[in-house]
Image (spheres, rainbow, N blue to C red):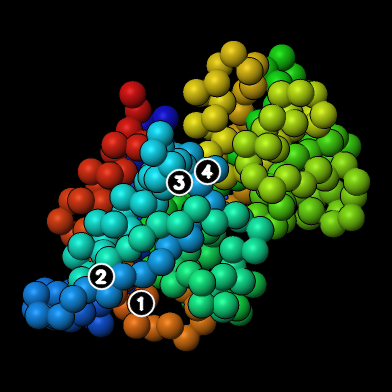
């Protein structure tokens, strides 16, 4: 497990270190300090579907916290802007950018070509993959293909939904769609489906932290391609993304990103 996570971490670094945008954000970072000192830093409203631990979830005070929150908050400090997180349902979230209700989305969003037609993304900040959850006594699910004739729960409109559609067919009634990942996993616990498919960090976090619920995970790195999370902004909002990227670059360079990553994903 440690090796896998270390590998993820390294590739996250490599992604940005080798990015061709390396020059522009560096200048931004250098000039953001005086800007911050003279003018009040701009505050951006950030939408997060806070049912997605450990990336975004609500604490006792109903504030959004998690890995994404810490990464973007640290990036904001370096990039010379402020962030205010607002719990925002996954469904309809992308539309809030165009409507001007949110400036940014921090919601473990996978950067995809399809989504890039409608919104812009920051540099990638996390590598993920789909992961299968099944009941812990299930023995006939060893690969993704083994779900072919089974009922599968996903969160609507996620990359998990997309991969399952490819396997089962878009309109297959065996795909059960839920508005949040915890609801999809609850359905699995209740026996309404045979499996659930979702982002590895979230699925494994749930399975590990709810041992009484009798679930297990099945990895299939051959069937599932790596995915990269990015912070999303309204198409054309280059200003906010330049600041986010400058901040991301700075926190990756000074060890802040690494520390946050370890806090959430180091083997305990
Ligand atoms: N990474 C997946 C996607 O982009 C799932 C993201 C769901 N995020 C959330 N906070 N519910 O489709």
Could you tell me residue 184's position as x and y percent?
Answer: 70, 38
Could you tell me residue 267's position as x and y percent?
Answer: 35, 28
Residue 208, above or below 113: above
Spatial CA distance of label 4 from label 1 is 24 Å
- Mark 4 closeness class: few <14, some 14–19, many ≥20 residues within 10 Å: many
- The answer to whether the residue labelled 2 contacts the one labelled 1, judged by CB atoms less than 8 Å apart, is yes
- The answer to whether the residue labelled 4 contacts the one labelled 1, judged by CB atoms less than 8 Å apart, is no
Q: Mark 1 points at which residue?
A: 240
Residue 124, above or below 128: below
Residue at screen point 48% across, 60% down: 47
Q: Can residue 112 be seen in this view?
A: no
Q: Name the residue under label 3.
A: 56
- Mark 1 closeness class: few <14, some 14–19, many ≥20 residues within 10 Å: many
Q: Name the residue under label 2.
A: 81
Which of these two is toward me, 178 or 261? 178
Tell me the tag on residue 52. 4
Quadrant location of the N terminus?
top left
Tell me the tag on residue 79. none
Residue at screen point 39% across, 38% down: 61
Q: Does the residue labelled 4 lie within 8 Å of ligand 1?
A: yes
Sequence-first tag of 1 and 3:
3
Q: Is mark 4 on a helix, strand or loop?
A: strand
Could you tell me residue 263's position as x and y percent?
Answer: 29, 36
Sequence-first tag of 4 and 2:
4
Sequence-first tag of 3 and 2:
3
- The answer to whether the residue labelled 3 contacts the one labelled 4, judged by CB atoms less than 8 Å apart, is yes
Q: Does the residue labelled 3 lie within 8 Å of ligand 1?
A: yes
Sequence-first tag of 2 and 1:
2
Q: Can residue 236 be seen in this view?
A: yes
Quadrant of the image occupied by residue 33: bottom left
């Amino acid at each position: 497990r440690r090796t896998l996570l270390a590998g993820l971490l390294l590739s996250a670094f490599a992604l940005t270190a080798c990015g061709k945008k390396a020059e522009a954000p560096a200048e931004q970072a250098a000039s953001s300090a005086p800007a911050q000192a003279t003018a009040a830093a701009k505050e951006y409203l950030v939408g997060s579907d806070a049912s997605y631990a450990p990336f975004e979830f609500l604490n006792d005070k109903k504030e959004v916290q998690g890995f994404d929150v810490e990464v973007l908050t640290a990036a904001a400090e370096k990039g010379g802007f402020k962030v205010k997180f607002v719990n925002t349902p996954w469904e309809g979230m992308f539309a809030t950018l165009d409507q001007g209700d949110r400036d940014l989305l921090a919601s473990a969003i996978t950067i995809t070509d399809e989504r890039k037609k409608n919104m812009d993304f920051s540099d990638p900040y996390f590598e993920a993959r789909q992961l299968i959850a099944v009941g812990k006594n299930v023995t006939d699910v060893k690969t993704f293909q083994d779900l072919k004739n089974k009922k599968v729960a996903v969160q609507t409109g996620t990359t998990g939904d997309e991969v399952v559609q490819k396997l089962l067919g878009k309109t297959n009634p065996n795909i059960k769609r839920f508005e949040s990942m915890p609801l999809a996993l609850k359905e699995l616990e209740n026996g309404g489906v045979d499996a659930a498919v979702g982002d590895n960090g979230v699925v494994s976090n749930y399975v590990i932290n709810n041992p009484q619920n009798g679930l297990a995970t099945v990895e299939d790195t051959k069937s599932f391609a790596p995915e990269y999370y990015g912070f999303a902004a309204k198409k054309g909002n280059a200003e906010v993304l330049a600041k986010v990227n400058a901040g991301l670059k700075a926190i990756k360079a000074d060890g802040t990103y690494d520390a946050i990553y370890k806090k959430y994903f180091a083997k305990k």
